[in-house]
Amino acid sequence: MEPYSVNKKATFNYEILETFTAGIELSGHEAKSIKLGRFDLSGSHAIIRGGEAFLVGATIHPFQVKNAPADYDVTRTRKLLLKRDELAYLVGKLHEGLTLVPLKSYNKRGFVKIELGLGRGKKQYDKRETIKKRDAEREIRRNI
């Protein structure tokens, strides 16, 4: 199960507390495009409005540029498919100041799924500490 797209900045900018799996509502050419790897999750987030979850800011480039519909928007808001009890749980957590961030997209039995992470934003000093740890581990591996 190799992911179609991974949001590398999400784990750097957020401390992920929980993960959820959601389906995504797509048109046919968008699904083909994702399966070809023309999907970008960087800078995107999920919101909940009116009892439904939506993916905002994700980019799906057209499958065939010349055959794309004239009114096709690559960054349109797409509906996420979650269970009602998961939505209720997430609404409560989002009111506590947490953020819903897409981590990766992958294939599950022919369907495109999005792994969402419920996270808290890291402060600047936490990010610097992460960079220092990563550099130290890289040096240790280099010396061995």
Image (cartoon, rainbow, N blue to C red):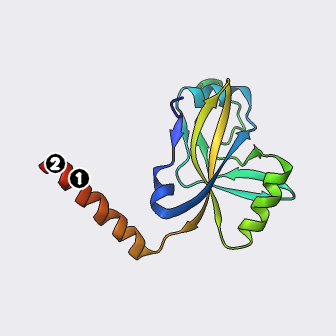
Give the amino acid type for the residue marked by disc 2 in the picture. Answer: Arg
Residue 138, numbered label: 1
As drawn, is 88 to the left or to the right of 133? right
Quadrant for the N terminus, please: top right
Residue furthest front in the image = 144
Q: Position of residue 139 (x, y in %)?
A: 18, 55
Front residue of 27 and 141: 141
Badge 1 crowding class, 10 Å Cα cut-off, few under 14, some 14 to 19, many 20 or more, is few
Left or right for 27, reference 68: right
Element under disc 2? helix
Residue 27, visible in the rendered structure: yes
Task: Determine the image quadrant of residue 67.
Answer: top right
* Vertical placement of residue 4 versus 132, above or below: above
Q: Nearer the viewer, residue 131 or 144?
A: 144
Q: Distance between the Cα atoms at labels 1 and 2?
A: 6 Å
Task: Give above or below for 6 relative to 87.
Answer: above
Q: Residue at x 80, y 55 (%)?
A: 87
Residue 15 to residue 76: above or below: below
Residue at horizontal 47 percent and vertical 55 percent from the top:
9
Question: Label 2 crowding class (10 Å Cα cut-off): few <14, some 14-19, many 20+?
Answer: few
Residue matched to label 2: 142
Residue drawn at x 78%, y 46% is: 82
